[in-house]
Amino acid sequence: MEQKNTVKSWPEAAPRLIAVASGRAPADLVIRGGQWVNVHTREVLTGHDIAIAEGRFAAIAPDLSASIGPDTRVIEANGRYMIPGLCDAHMHIESGMLTPAEFAAAVIPHGTTTMFTDPHEIANVLGLRGVKMMHDEALLQPVNIFTQMPSCAPSAPGLETTGFEINPEDVAAAMAWPGIIGLGEMMNFPGVINADPKMLAEIAATQTAGKTVGGHYASPDLGAPFRAYAAGGPADDHEGTCEADAIARVRQGMRSMMRLGSAWYDVETQITAVTQKGLDPRNFILCTDDCHSGTLVHDGHMNRVYRHAVACGADPLVALQMCTLNTATHFGLERELGSITPGRRADLILTSDLVTLPVEHVIARGQTVAMEGKLMVTCPHYDWPADARATVNLGKHLTAADFAIHAPDGANTVTARVIGVVENQAPTKALTAEMPVVDGRVLADPARDLAQIALVERHRGTGGVVNGFVSGFGYQGRMAMGSTVAHDSHHMIVVGTDPEMMAACANRLGEMGGGISVWKDGVEIAAVPLPIAGLMSDDPAATVADRAGAMVQAMAECGCTLNNAYMQHSLLALVVIPEIRISDLGLVDVTRFELTELFE
């Protein structure tokens, strides 16, 4: 597919860049009189001009008036800082509930000009074909969206069933696609630790192609298992939650990716490795991992992460390196992007302050793409086929009986395993609760913050429902909330206090073709349609954010007080993050990577 706002390769552009830099030819664009923030030397150099040609930086110097011709566009920086466009090192576009085009449209005004995306969500629903659709729409955008080929669909073989599976042959084939930058996060860390041939074959195919292997080590054990994982080849990791995690990763030659997403607040607890321990910051990178549309529209993207890192004590120039040059270097693109230096893609931001970082003017590939928060370009859409919009197959009409939890014969009370939600973190707690048996059934107990959770199979129409209990949402009254976003297998997760509400919610999602639905007292009070793979909408981000905002309010009306509770909800089936999750095969003990029973 043809890329919009294309940029010539450095060798193709070199003759023109040299001519402009030497003053023999005019530039396409000159930015005049700004403060050049050089992330290679960690300096701010006042009174500089920038000359751009062929979508790349040609020269940066105190006076480039010789590069201004009659057709050269001139932007007056007026003493503002000129910083590189921001890079998100690890993220999932699907988590924004948006397609790549609408995600790009949402983040460009925030100064994000490069994203490294892992579309493993759609891989679980539509397989390699779905990944190719995401890849192809990414290449249409006026900013840089590089795709990591998903590595783990399913994320934990034997513990879940996905719509499609990814194999080493898929990985090897994808490495030849023009926008593939490496292998997506290797979530099956037990597989790597145990030298699983399939996982090692995927890593080998990536390394043979000379590309980067993404990591995902979601365990607090920094001993032999972590050493084994590092030996397997992953080059980075974003699952750290404390200073010791960050230090362990960089000491083993990995990059520590510190994330601030909609629900993940892992920068403050790890950046002390740099700000207090004094470790070399070049191996630390900032990322978002998962940001929903509301965060993008109202709070920002990588600019939000940068500001947070500075607020946590990072030197602004160090924080800037962590979301520009460090990221580019990690993916082997230091000579292509990540800094304002000759030959690199002309991606930059004009800002009047390096602490609060107001994003006043965004340039990508030498073209103005946003000004004062307003998008100035078009982000083209891919023509998503009809079958990508018809992925919710329940197989039958569900009833309250499908959500009934039956006790063992003769039991008056049971000890139930309960998934404990941890606010602002991906891990859950494996809890237990003594629960009474009423007419042979075990019921939700809102008074003790014990709700039901159900995993409804939605790929093959089996009609299967796995039931359990969850704590932490604080739901009260008769309610249910369901979502077809259910990382990573993306079946359907329904949480509720009433089986009838849960059945109504699940059926509604089936009719809607995927998305989110919240019910209270027999009535749907909020809905977010996500028709593409049951994961994304191709409506504008602001529209989706409004619906998502109404959904958050509806959750609050049902008693939920958690920060970003929807993100927590959507991860309850992620069977590669401890301690306990739910899948279409049953409850999963993620500390042992095995299925476990609901009742002790």
Image: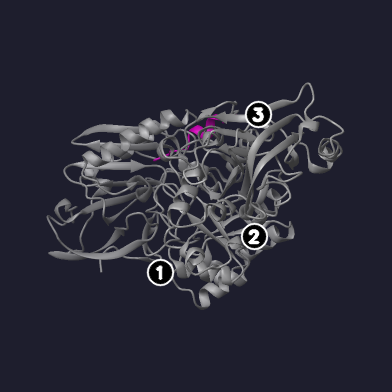
- For the residues labelled 3 and 1, the Cα–Cα distance comes to 56 Å
- Quarter of the image where the N terminus is located: top right
Labels 2 and 1: the sequence-earlier one: 2
Query: Circle 2: is it few (<14), some (14-19), or many (20+) Cα within 10 Å?
Result: many
Decide which of tag 2 and tag 3 comes sooner along the chain: 3
Residue sticking out furthest to the bottom: 224
Lower position in the chain sequence, tag 3 or tag 1: 3
Residue extending furthest toward the top: 70
Q: Is residue 418 visible?
A: yes
Res 587 seen here: no
| Magenta stretch, residue numbers | 383-394
Residue 47 x/y as whole percent: 66, 40
Q: Residue at x 38, y 60 (%)?
A: 427
Q: Report the mark closest to the observer, 3 or 1.
A: 3
Left or right: 51, with 425 as reference point: right
Q: What distance separates the C-alpha of mark 2 from that of mark 1?
A: 24 Å
Pointer 2: what residue?
202
Q: Residue tagged by mark 1?
A: 591
- Tell me which residue sits at (68%, 35%) in the image: 365
Tag shown at residue 75: 3
Q: Report, in whole angstroms, how far the alpha carbon at label 2 lies from the one at label 3.
A: 47 Å
Figure check: 271 above or below 452: below
Q: Quadrant of residue 191?
A: bottom right
